[in-house]
Image: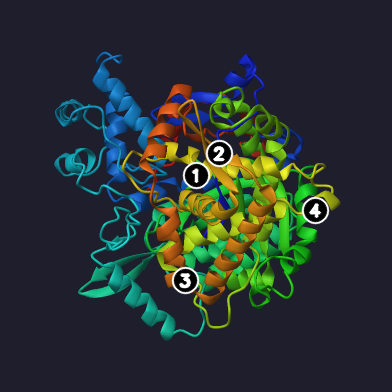
C-alpha cells in the first residue's frame, strides 16, 4: 500500500535565482538528474541531547544502505564495487570520453541505488564500451575492493536484454520472472500468489503485510520465505542498524521514544510481523515527541506484486510553526470524512488518531535517498489506521529546496497557457502545493474503510497506483472547498486553481519528460497522475471542462470550468474508494489500463522537445548534511555539529566505504 507523495513539478515563480541560491542548493547535474542541497533550519536550536539523539538515528539510517542496493538487484553491490574501484584508481586522462561516461554511469547508479533508473525502472545504458571497462578492471591495483566474477557482470551491465527492468508492471506478463529486483528467486508470480493465498487461509492473525520483510525463493522444490532479521537475510546490516538504534535510545527525549526503539529492535531481532505491528502502533501513537524517525522495510513500490518493503529511513524533527497548518487539518478530520463525496458505506464513523505535522528532515536514507518523498503517511496497515490512527508528515525543508532551486527556470513561461494563470501559480502555487501534500497524507491515505472480509491486498499489482490516486483525489477535491477558507488555510477562493492547473498540466503533459519515446507509463505515482488527469479530460469533454489548445504549433492546457473539474474529481474519488473498499480488482485494473498506461506519442514528442530547450533536469535528489560528533577529552560525545559542504560523489563513495555491511 502506498503512503508517500513525490514531487514532480518543475513549476516555480519567476523570481530570478541568485548566486547565493545557486551555491546553496545546486550540487551536481548529470544525465536527467540534478542533485540539490537541503538545509536543516532549527538544528542548532535543539538541545545537545536532541542533537546527539538525531546523530545516532542518522547513523542507524545510513547503516542499512547496502540492503536497499541488494534488494534492487542481486548484482548491484558487485557492480558498485567495480565501478567505484575503476573511478577511484583510474590514472589516465580524466577528461577522456570513456572516463567521463564512466563518471556519469557511476553517478546514475549511486542515485538509483543500483543499475536501474529509480523512476522508470529501466536499466542504464553505459556510454563506455565493455572492452574499455574490462581493460580498466584488469588494471585495478591488487587489494582493490571487488566481489563477484567480472565475466558474469559484463552482460548484466552491457546486454540490454539481460535484466532490463527492475520492476515490470506490463499487463499479461509474469511480473516476478520479468522483474530484475532481488526479492524473488526461482519462483513464478503464480507460485508466489498461491503461497500467500494459502498462508492467509490458514492463519487467524493477519499481520501488517504479508511478505513485508522477506525474500521468496524455492528450496528443494518448495516455496519458502527468507526473513530479513538479525541472524537471517541481511544480518550484518541489521546488526549495525540495531547497534546505533540502541545508542540513540540512551539519548531519547522520553520513555515513549525508548519504548518505540526497543520494539523496533525486538522486531529486527525476531523478524516477526506481529512485533512490527506493535512497533507501528507505538510509533503512530507518539504525537508528543519533537524528534522522530522512520526506519524499516516500508514501501512496496519496488516489488512487482506490491508486498515486500524496501529499506528506508528518514530522521526528522517537528517544525513547530508550520505544523499549525497540519494540526488544523487533523483536528477537522471527522468533518472531511463525513463530507467526502464517497458512498457512506465506505466512510469511517470516526477517524481515529490522525496526527499531522510539518517536519524538518535531518537525514534521508535507503529508499528515500538521494530521491525523496515530500510527504509520508504511516503505518500502511489498514487495520492499524482504523484502530490506532496514522501519522502524517510534510517535509517542508525539502519542498523549500525544490522551490529555491527551480526559481527562474522558464518552465511556467514555456508550458502555462497565459500570464494570468502564471501569476496565480506564482502567488498561490507554494501554499496550495503544500496543502495538497498535507491533505493527501493526513486525510487522503487515512480516509475510507474496507468492507468486512475484503483482503487489503485485493488490488494486487495495481494497489499502489490506486491508493495514490485515492489520496490525490481526496486532496484535490478538498483544496477547492470553502472549509479551507473557513479554517484560515487559504485567503482566496480561487487559490486552489493554481494546484488544479498544475496537476492537470503535469498529468496530461509535463510528467512525460520522464518517459522515453515509445514507452508506457509504469511508475505508480506517474500512473496515478495520468489516470486522474486523463479521466477528467475524457469525462469532461461534453462540457468542455479541459481543453487542449494549439498556439504557434504548441499545445497548452486550458481549464474552462474549475467547478466542474472539482465535481469530476469527486466522482472519480467515489469510484476509486468503492474499488478499494470492495476489493474490486477487475474495475481497478480496467481504470489503470485505460487511462494510466498509454502515452499519446505526438504530445509526448512535443513535450520532450520543448522541455529539452529549457535544459531543466526532470529528476532531482539530494545530498545529506554531514553530522560530526563533538567529543570531550575522555572520548564521550557531548554535542553534534552540522555542515553542508560535502559534494555528491564524495558523499556516496564515503557511504560505500564507511557503511559497507554486505
Tag 3 residue = 457
Q: Residues within 10 Å of mark 3 (few under 14, many from 20)?
A: some
Looking at the image, is mark 2 or mark 4 earlier in the sequence? 4
Q: Is residue 283 above or below residue 452?
A: above
Q: Give the residue number, with chain letter if any, for mark 1.
A: 508
- Looking at the image, do the residues carrying marks 1 and 3 touch, with CB atoms under 8 Å apart? no
Q: Does 261 appear above or below 147?
A: below
Between the C-alphas of marks 1 and 3, the distance is 29 Å
Between residues 358 and 624, which one lies in front from this camera angle? Answer: 358
Q: CA distance from mark 1 to mark 2?
A: 8 Å
Comparing labels 1 and 2, the label whose residue is closer to the camera: 2
Work out how far the residue at label 1 is from the one at label 4, CA to CA, in angstroms.
Answer: 27 Å
Residue 557 numbered tag: 2
On the image, the x and y values in percent for residue 468 come to: 54, 57
**Disc number lying in front (2 or 4):** 2
Disc on the earlier residue, 3 or 4: 3
Q: Which residue is mark 4?
A: 482
Q: Do the numbered discs 2 and 4 sit on residues whose CB atoms are within 8 Å?
A: no
Q: Quadrant of residue 421?
A: top right
Amino acid at each position: 500500500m502506498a503512503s508517500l507523495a513525490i514531487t514532480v513539478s518543475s513549476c516555480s515563480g519567476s523570481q530570478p535565482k541568485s548566486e547565493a541560491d545557486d551555491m546553496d542548493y545546486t550540487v551536481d547535474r548529470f544525465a536527467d538528474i540534478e542533485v540539490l542541497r537541503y538545509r536543516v533550519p532549527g538544528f542548532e536550536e535543539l538541545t545537545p541531547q536532541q542533537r546527539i539523539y538525531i546523530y545516532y538515528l542518522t547513523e542507524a539510517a545510513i547503516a542499512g544502505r547496502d540492503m536497499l542496493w541488494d534488494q534492487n538487484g542481486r548484482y548491484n553491490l558487485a557492480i558498485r564495487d567495480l565501478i567505484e574501484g575503476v573511478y577511484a584508481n583510474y590514472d589516465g586522462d580524466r577528461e577522456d570520453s570513456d572516463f567521463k561516461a564512466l563518471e556519469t554511469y557511476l553517478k546514475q547508479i549511486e542515485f538509483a541505488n543500483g543499475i536501474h533508473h529509480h523512476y522508470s525502472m529501466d536499466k542504464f545504458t553505459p556510454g563506455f564500451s565493455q572492452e574499455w571497462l574490462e581493460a580498466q578492471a584488469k588494471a585495478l591495483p591488487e587489494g582493490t575492493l571487488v566481489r563477484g566474477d567480472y565475466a558474469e557482470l559484463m552482460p548484466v551491465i552491457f546486454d540490454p536484454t539481460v535484466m532490463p527492468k527492475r520492476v515490470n508492471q506490463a499487463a499479461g506478463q509474469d511480473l516476478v520472472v520479468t522483474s530484475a529486483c532481488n526479492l524473488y528467486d526461482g519462483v513464478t508470480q503464480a507460485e508466489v500468489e498461491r503461497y500467500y493465498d494459502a498462508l492467509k487461509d490458514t492463519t487467524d492473525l493477519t499481520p501488517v503485510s504479508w511478505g513485508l520483510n522477506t525474500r521468496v525463493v524455492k528450496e528443494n522444490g518448495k516455496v519458502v520465505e527468507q526473513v530479513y532479521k538479525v541472524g537471517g537475510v541481511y544480518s550484518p546490516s541489521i546488526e549495525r542498524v540495531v547497534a546505533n538504534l540502541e545508542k540513540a535510545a540512551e539519548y531519547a527525549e522520553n520513555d515513549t521514544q525508548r519504548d518505540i526503539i526497543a520494539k523496533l529492535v525486538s522486531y529486527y531481532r525476531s523478524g516477526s510481523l506481529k512485533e512490527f505491528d506493535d512497533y507501528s502502533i507505538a510509533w503512530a501513537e507518539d504525537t508528543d515527541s519533537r524528534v522522530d524517525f522512520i526506519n524499516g522495510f516500508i514501501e512496496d513500490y519496488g516489488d512487482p506484486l506490491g508486498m515486500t518493503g524496501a529499506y528506508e529511513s528518514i530522521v526528522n524533527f517537528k517544525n513547530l510553526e508550520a505544523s499549525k497548518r497540519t494540526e488544523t487539518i487533523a483536528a477537522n478530520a471527522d468533518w472531511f470524512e463525513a463530507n467526502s463525496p464517497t458512498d457512506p458505506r465506505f466512510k469511517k464513523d470516526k477517524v481515529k488518531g490522525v496526527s499531522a505535522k510539518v517536519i524538518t528532515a535531518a537525514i534521508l536514507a535507503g529508499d528515500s535517498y538521494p530521491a525523496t518523498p515530500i510527504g509520508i503517511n504511516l503505518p500502511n496497515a489498514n487495520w492499524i489506521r482504523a484502530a490506532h490512527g496514522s501519522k502524517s508528515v510534510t517535509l517542508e525543508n525539502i519542498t523549500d529546496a525544490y522551490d529555491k532551486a527551480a526559481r527562474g527556470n522558464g518552465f511556467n513561461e514555456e508550458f502555462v497557457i497565459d500570464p494570468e494563470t502564471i501569476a496565480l501559480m506564482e502567488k498561490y502555487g507554494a501554499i496550495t502545493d503544500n496543502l495538497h501534500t498535507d491533505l493527501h497524507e493526513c486525510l487522503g491515505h487515512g480516509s475510507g474503510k474496507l468492507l468486512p472480509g475484503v483482503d487489503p491486498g485485493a488490488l494486487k499489482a495495481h494497489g499502489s497506483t490506486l491508493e495514490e490516486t485515492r489520496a490525490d483525489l481526496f486532496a484535490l477535491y478538498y483544496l477547492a472547498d470553502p472549509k479551507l477558507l473557513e479554517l484560515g488555510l487559504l485567503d482566496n477562493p480561487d487559490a486552489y486553481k493554481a494546484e488544479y492547473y498544475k496537476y492537470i498540466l503535469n498529468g496530461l503533459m509535463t510528467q512525460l519528460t520522464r518517459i522515453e519515446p515509445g514507452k508506457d507509463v509504469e511508475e505508480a505515482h506517474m500512473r496515478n497522475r495520468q489516470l486522474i488527469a486523463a479521466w477528467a479530460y475524457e469525462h469532461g469533454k461534453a462540457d468542455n471542462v479541459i481543453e487542449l489548445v494549439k498556439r504557434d504549433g504548441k499545445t497548452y492546457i486550458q481549464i474552462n470550468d474549475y467547478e466542474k473539474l472539482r465535481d469530476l474529481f469527486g466522482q472519480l474519488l467515489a469510484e476509486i474508494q468503492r474499488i478499494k473498499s470492495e476489493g474490486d480488482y477487475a474495475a481497478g485494473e480496467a481504470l489503470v489500463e485505460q487511462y494510466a498506461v498509454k502515452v499519446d506519442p505526438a504530445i509526448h514528442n512535443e513535450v520532450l522537445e520543448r522541455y529539452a530547450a529549457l535544459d531543466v533536469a526532470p529528476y532531482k535528489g539530494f545530498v545529506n548534511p554531514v553530522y560530526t560528533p563533538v567529543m570531550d577529552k575522555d572520548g564521550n560525545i557531548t554535542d553534534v555539529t552540522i555542515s553542508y559542504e560535502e559534494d555528491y560523489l564524495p558523499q556516496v563513495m564515503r557511504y560505500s566505504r564507511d557503511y559497507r555491511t554486505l
